[in-house]
Amino acid sequence: MPDGIDFKDLHRRFDGAIAAFKHDIASLRTGRASANLLDPIHVDAYGASMPVNQVATVSVPEPRMISVSVWDQSLVGAVDRAIREANLGFNPIVEGSTLRIPLPELNEERRKELVKIAHQYAEHARVAARHVRRDGMEHLKKAEKDGEISQDEARVQSDRVQKMTDETIAAIDKLLAEKEVEILQV
């Protein structure tokens, strides 16, 4: 195939947009406990800000409970403080070097807020996919202008880029719909 677009690179970038979206929605709280809920929380430990999972083991022993086993006893207070100050609505119970975090039921209002946040994450992912498409299209136009590829080849490749974009956005929408059902499930 003549020069034009590196479709492997575009595919990698589209996959990156989907992966980032998956990571974002994984941290959204649903009716069940998940170790990912604590991912955005950072603890001031050893003179640096570290994610909770780097100073403790995070597990889910029950559907409505998160257990955080802090490795260094001196950091229990810092982890407790970080979780409380994260404004996630969690109130850890300290038991020695373990923090137990009971998850209260989500009310309807909070569920709707979480759905809105999920929609925002989805829109960011769609925008990222559109940026990848734009970069690909600009590359094609430049290649066509420079005479590296023919007009027909540019059209074929631009259709392929558009198809990849549509598939990526469809995948994002599918993930969003699944997460929405999961959040609204009582």
Image (spheres, rainbow, N blue to C red):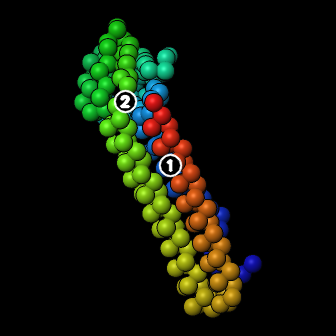
Residue located at (39% from left, 53% from top)? 120
Q: Quadrant of the N terminus?
A: bottom right
- Residue 27 place in picture, x, y as percent: 43, 38
Query: Does residue 122 appear left or right of residue 94 in this picture?
Result: right
Q: How many marks?
A: 2
Q: Which numbered disc, 2 or 1, marks the residue that appears first in the sequence?
A: 2
Disc 2 crowd, CA 10 A, few/some/many (<14, 14-19, 20+): some
Rounded to the nearest angstrom, the CA distance separating label 2 from label 1 is 19 Å
The three-letter amino acid code for the residue at tag 1 is Leu
Residue at numbered disc 2 = 106
Residue at x 44%, y 20% (from the top left corner): 64
SS under mark 1: helix
Q: Residue at x 62, y 66 (%)?
A: 164
- The quarter of the picture where residue 161 lies is bottom right
- Residue 96, given in percent of the width and then of the height, sits at 34, 8
Neighbour class for label 1 at 10 Å: few (<14), some, many (≥20)?
A: many
Is residue 81 depicted above or below 118 in this figure?
above
List the residue tagged with mark 1. 176
Name the residue type under label 2.
Answer: Leu
Does dot 2 land on a helix, a strand or a loop? loop
Residue at image x 43%, y 19%?
Answer: 65
